[in-house]
Amino acid sequence: MLPPFSSLSRLARRSDESLPWDDECVDRLDERSRKRVGDYWAGRAEAELRVAVAFASLGEQLRDTGTEPAVLALLDASVANERYHASLCERLAVRYLGMPIAKPQAGQVHLPPLPGVDRPMRAALFAAGLCAVNESIATVWLEHGFARATAPLARAVNQIHLADEVVHARVGWAHLASRWVTPVMRRDLSRWLVPLLRTNVAQWLASETLAGPGVPDHGLVDPIEQRAHVLGAVHNVVIPGFDHVGIDVSAAARWFKAEFG
Ligand SMILES: [Fe+2]
Ligand SMILES: [Fe+2]
């Protein structure tokens, strides 16, 4: 059932002052690991701002082409979430690095132009890519970061992010399941699924976080383990999710098996 309006109003009242910013585990961490975790959060701060911009654009498109009011309510909350996450990530980066960082910037955010695709289909594709695929993978990513983390600050922040990412993924799934995505669009979506997954999975696997050692106690999971979690999210959550909303996933399942076994 949609939407969790109680959680939407909770978001509006948020304060991060209750988080354990003076967590001594951060101070005890070796310098190299502190830099690695700090750099990770600094990068995440900018990524969160880019997602906020992309979500705002998706909101405009869905207002134009139509969706359920609950989807728009969740999406508006998601834009606010991502801006909040950016500020949280910036503060974490400063805490771990022990010095100020340059103000995070979203920079230019260009969604793929998708020439020849009509507006409702374009909105459905962005809802699928930005929310259903990307945020479902993010949810699994953070779930494992949270599970591995022992430092109180890392656990608290991963928990906040995790709770929100579930909502962001729901935006995509809820729109795809709605009457605004017609049977014809569902057939078209099945043809887009492989390129959509290929692009999205490649971006996750190219993440700089997977190019260096993990700091699991602080939420950075070992790269080999985290790569397996990304692929597990696609195989166990994303592909079955598209199947659940009536989109033919046979080509996507074949692609996944051929690519990753
Ligand atoms: Fe986020
Ligand atoms: Fe998100």
Image: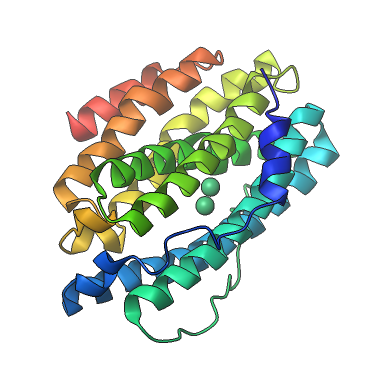
Instruction: Give the mark count.
Output: 0
Q: Position of residue 219 (x, y in %)?
A: 29, 53
Quarter of the image that includes the N terminus: top right
**With respect to residue 74, does 47 lie above or below?**
below
At 73% across and 32% down in the image, what residue appears?
5
Q: Is residue 75 visible?
A: no
Q: Nearer the viewer, residue 11 or 180?
A: 11
Residue 48 spot, x, y in % from top left? 53, 60
Q: Quadrant of residue 23?
A: bottom left
How was this image coloured? rainbow
In this orientation, which residue lies closer to the viewer: 182 or 115?
182
Q: Is residue 112 above or below residue 101?
A: above
Instruction: Report x, y in % for residue 47.
Output: 49, 62
Q: Is residue 146 visible?
A: yes
Viewed as shown, does residue 215 lie left or right of 179?
left
Reply above or below: 6 against 16. above
Say which residue appears at 28% left-offset and 40% top-offset.
147
The C terminus lies in quadrant: top left
The residue at the point 62 percent across, 37 percent down is 127
Where is residue 102 drawn, in percent x and y? 50, 85
**Is 106 on the left or on the right of 98, as rendered?**
right
